[in-house]
Amino acid sequence: MITKLLLFSGFAGITVFIGGLLANFFNHHIKESPVKYEITHTLMSFGSGIMLSAIALVLIPKGMEELELLPIIFSFLLGSILFMLLSQYLAKKGGKTATLLAMLMDFIPESIALGAVFAIEPSMATLLAIFIGLQNLPEAFNSFRDLVQSGFTINKTLIIFFCLSFFGIAGALIGHFFLREYPDLTAHLMVFASGGILYLLIQDIIPESKLDKNYLTSIGAILGFLVGIIGDKVV
């Protein structure tokens, strides 16, 4: 049982590092061109769509199953407000970390939820592992670019991403051993994350993914959300 959980959470986490490696190759080994620029923005949109699907199909529904209306409102607004304040603080520092924050905001609570529901709902755990892995790939791809533009070296960024890959395993183990008996706490965490992710998407990520006089990049968001629908339906 634990071995299977480690495999699921390990798959979900390793895509963070793989996304960073792909971004490094794409950014430094593919010549600059309008097509490359469009691909980058389309991937940003794709990641946004997957994050929206995580909110709509996993985080909020699971939270609504366990919580009453007022606790949902409280956790959702708390996540939104705290990440608004954090985003303002980071903007003053001059860093571009919104995509990384959004990635961690769904990666960590979903990993904890993966561990918490693994023994109770194996099909839900499988869906979460697939969701997390698919989300992390484009999100890490975009986060890599943002961190490098903020002044991080390539090697330092890849080391950060390699370390973040293990957050999924750590979160899943925490959820499995400490939170599976407290579904309400897991639900609060998921709703809190939803508020933070939604703020970061609307404030930073979606506006940056848009290109003037280009309408195809937005299809990336549609396809990202469609991936979430397919995963939810198949699993």
Image: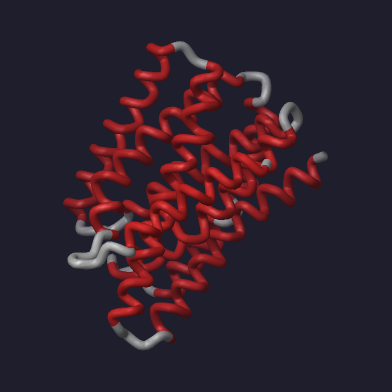
- Quarter of the picture holding the N terminus: top right
- Quarter of the picture holding the C terminus: top right
Q: Give how far across and how far down residue 186 sits, in percent.
A: 55, 26
Q: Is residue 213 left or right of residue 167?
A: left
Question: Residue drawn 69% across and 42% down?
Answer: 126
Return the residue nearer the eye: 219 or 113. 219
Q: Give how far across and how far down residue 20 sits, in percent.
A: 49, 68
Above or below for 62 versus 69: below
Above or below for 26 versus 102: below
Return the residue nearer the eye: 213 or 199. 213
Above or below for 127 versus 209: above
Q: Is residue 113 left or right of residue 31?
A: right
Q: Is residue 171 visible?
A: no
All told, the count of numbered labels is 0
Q: Give how far across and how far down residue 88 sits, in percent.
A: 20, 44
Question: Residue drawn 43% across and 86% down?
Answer: 29
Q: Quadrant of residue 215?
A: bottom left
Question: Residue drawn 48% across and 24% down?
Answer: 188
Specify the color scheme: secondary structure
Q: Give how far across and how far down residue 216 sits, in percent.
A: 32, 64
Question: Residue drawn 66% across and 30% down?
Answer: 116
Q: Is residue 132 left or right of residue 44?
A: right
Q: Is residue 55 visible?
A: yes
